[in-house]
Amino acid sequence: MVVKQLIEGPEAAQRYAREVAALRLASRVDPPVVPGLLGADPVERVLVLEYLDEQPPADDWVVGYAEALARLHAATSADDVGLLPAWSGPTRDDIGSFLALARTLGCTVPSAVWTELDDLVNRLTHASGHALLHGDPCPGNDMHTSSGTRFIDFEQAALGHGLVELAYLRIGFPTCWCVTAPAQPLLDAAEAAYRTAWRHATGADVRDDLTDACAGWLLRGDALVERAYRGTADHLSKVPDGDWRWGTATARQRLVHRLGIVGRMTADGGELGNLGQLAMAMRGAVLSRWPALEPLPSRRP
C-alpha cells in the first residue's frame, strides 16, 4: 500500500477533501482509473492507497492516457454537482494581461479581439458540464500499469467540462512541469480515443471542439508557472523582460507553442478569428526577438 499525508500548508484541508472526494467518485469506474482508497483519516489528513505496479510509459502513451481520462471524466453526473468545487476558467483580468503583452510585443490589437475574448470567458465560465476533472492531469500524475493508465494526486479535482483537460495534449500541459507536444498522428489518435471512450461510457458524443478550451489556457499567465507562484503576479507581463525554466520548457517556449496552436485552430475564422490572427502576430514577434527558442519536447523524460 501507499500512505500519503498532506502536511500543513496552503489550503491543506481543502486539498485533502478534494482528493478523498475525487477518489471515491472515480472508484465507480471499471476497469479502474485510480488506485483504490483503502483508508482515510481526515484529522491527520492521511490517505491509504492501493499500491500500483507502475511500468515505463510506451511511446504512444498519450492514447491510453486520453482513453483513461475520458473514463475518469465520465465517472460523475449532474447528481454529483456540489461534491467538488466547480472548475474556474480565465477571467477578464487575464484578458487585460494578455492584450497588454500583445501591445508590449508591438502587435496591433483590434477592438474586435476584446469582444471575442470577453465572449470566450463568458462561454468558459458558463459552460455546462459535470465531468470529474483531475485538476492537474500531468505526466507523472498518470501511472502506466499492466491493466491500463491510472491517475493519482487529485488535490485540485473539480467538476466541469472535460474538454478543458483533453486540451492539455494539444495546448502543452498548462499546469505541468513535464510539458510535451506529441507528434500530430499521436495527438489525433489520442483525441479520437478520448471521444470514443466518452461515447462508450456515456452514450453521447463529446460536444464542441477544443478551440475555446485551448484559447482559455493561452490567456492564463498562471499557466506559465508552478502552483506555488500562481495568483501572485501578472506572469505574462514578465515574459518580455526575462525567461524562466519550469520543468521541461521555459515560459517563452510554452507561450510560443500555445500561440501557434490557437492561431492554427482559428485560421478559418469563426468566433475567435481575430484572436487567431493576433496570436500568430504575437508568435512572430516572440520568435523575432528570441529566434533561438526551441519547440517543446515531443517526448516525456
Image (spheres, rainbow, N blue to C red):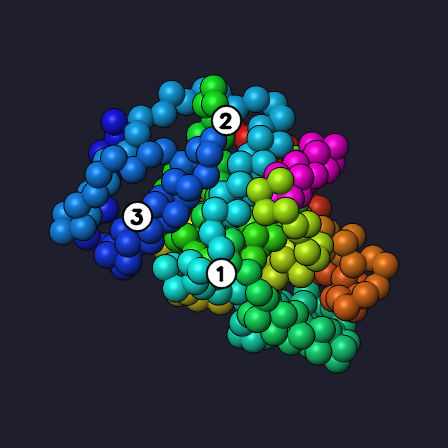
Q: Is 286 included in the stretch rendered in magenta? A: no
Residue contact at pointers 1 and 2, CB within 8 angstroms: no
- Which residue corresponds to the image point at 55% horizontal and 30% vertical from the top-left? 300
- In the displayed structure, would residue 198 be above or below residue 122? above
Residue where numbered disc 2 is placed = 148
Mark 1 is surrounded, within 10 Å at the Cα level, by few (under 14), some (14 to 19) or many (20 or more) other residues, namely few
Left or right relative to 184: residue 137: left
| Mark toward the viewer: 3 or 1 | 1
Per the image, label 3 sits on a secondary structure element best described as helix
Whether residue 31 is visible to the viewer of this picture, yes or no, is yes
Q: Amino acid at mark 1?
A: Ala
Spatial distance from mark 1 to mark 2, Cα to Cα? Answer: 27 Å
Left or right relative to 46: residue 225: right
Residue where numbered disc 3 is placed = 20
Q: Amino acid at mark 2?
A: Gly
Residue 219 percent location from the top left of the image: 60, 63
| Mark toward the viewer: 1 or 2 | 1
Q: Amino acid at mark 3?
A: Val
Residue where numbered disc 1 is placed = 78
- In the displayed structure, would residue 181 be above or below residue 162? above
Per the image, label 2 sits on a secondary structure element best described as strand
Characterize the magenta stretch by its predominant secondary structure.
Answer: helix
Spatial distance from mark 3 to mark 1, Cα to Cα? Answer: 19 Å
Per the image, label 1 sits on a secondary structure element best described as helix
> Of label 1 and label 2, which has the lower sequence position?
1
- In the displayed structure, would residue 146 be above or below residue 109? above
Residue contact at pointers 3 and 1, CB within 8 angstroms: no
Residue 125 percent location from the top left of the image: 55, 70
- Which residue corresponds to the image point at 65% horizontal and 50% vertical from the top-left? 204
> Of label 3 and label 1, which has the lower sequence position?
3
Whether residue 251 is visible to the viewer of this picture, yes or no, is no
Residue range corresponding to the magenta coloring: 184-199
